[in-house]
Amino acid sequence: MSLVTDLKKTKPGVDPHWNPGFDFSIVRSAKRRSISIEIRQAQVVIRAPVGVAEVLLLDFLRQKAQWVRQKIVEQTQRLAQLEPLVEPVYGAGAELPFLNERLTLVIGRGALAAIRRVDQQLHVILSTRSRLPDEQQIRQLLMRWYQQQALRVLTDKTRQLSARMGLVCTAVTVKATRSKWGHCTNRGAIQYNWNILLAPEHIVDYLVAHEVCHLRHQNHSRDFWALVASVCSSFATDRAWLKANGARLSL
């Protein structure tokens, strides 16, 4: 959840003794042109361009404090309903989600590390030459495999939907990002977080629809959401699912 404002619309004048009643951090970037408040996992971050006075940022936060508190309460309640995150165990017989499937790990050893899928199994070959612990080797191989599959699956889905909508996507890439599941540039390039393949396929389809629609609307206006709804009728529930469960999609 985020809120963005134009720098020209902010006016400093906050009481230096004002206390918002919640913790927050400030992150500055030379690439930014606006101020935003992001709330993820009930944590508040103010993002701003380099050089913007702190008093201006605090005043903006004061103006939006009621909205921020409301979102903190909502996210805290949602987090309380989730089971605690459990660190995954990478061993023989472990099951990993892959779209609508669950794949079972089969561990072997050989001179060279390798990984390949056989039906509903992922065969992981650990290198006898490696000095890395087994679990670290397994995780590295799994991450490489999921990235490769994500690039293939997401490129295919993006190309198909773009063509159907008469839009042009110039490039598809995958990366493990911390704050975003997808990003569409004004040049038509789309980047996805490859961990999305740990979600059910209808969530993947929603994410693709979301980013492809940004090829036409580089915003989150009513026109944008109307376009998303036209190609993904379940977008509202899919979006809510991703917000509630996104933190759990990680290797």
Image (spheres, rainbow, N blue to C red):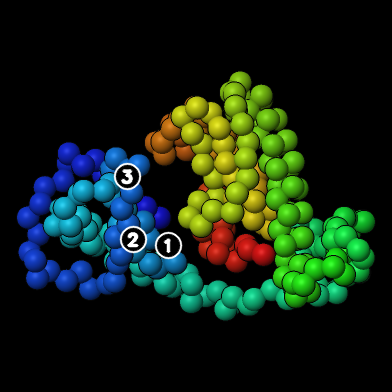
Residue 127 left/right relative to 233 = right
Residue 94 in picture, x, y percent from top left: 80, 73
Whether residue 89 is visible: yes
* Camera-nearest residue between 95 and 128: 128
Between disc 3 and disc 1, the foreground one is 3
In the picture of the structure, the residue carrying the numbered disc 3 is 30
The quadrant where residue 58 appears: bottom left
Q: Amino acid at mark 2?
A: Val
Residue 144 left/right relative to 57 = right
Residue 117 in picture, x, y percent from top left: 88, 55
In the picture of the structure, the residue carrying the numbered disc 2 is 45
* Camera-nearest residue between 127 and 56: 127
| CB under 8 Å between discs 1 and 2 | yes
Q: Earlier in the sequence, mark 1 or mark 2?
A: 1
In the picture of the structure, the residue carrying the numbered disc 1 is 40
The quadrant where residue 192 appears: top right
Residue 170 left/right relative to 91 = left
Considering the numbered disc 2 on the image, is that residue within a helix, a strand or a loop? Answer: strand
* Camera-nearest residue between 223 and 41: 41
At x 29%, y 40%, the residue is 33
At x 74%, y 47%, the residue is 148
Per the model, the C-alpha gap separating discs 1 and 2 is: 8 Å
| CB under 8 Å between discs 2 and 3 | no
At x 31%, y 53%, the residue is 28
Q: Earlier in the sequence, mark 2 or mark 3?
A: 3
Between disc 2 and disc 3, the foreground one is 3
Question: Dot 3, how many residues are within 10 Å of its Cα: few (below 14), some (14-19), or many (20+)?
Answer: few
Considering the numbered disc 1 on the image, is that residue within a helix, a strand or a loop? Answer: strand
Residue 26 in picture, x, y percent from top left: 29, 60
At x 12%, y 69%, the residue is 18
Question: Dot 1, how many residues are within 10 Å of its Cα: few (below 14), some (14-19), or many (20+)?
Answer: some
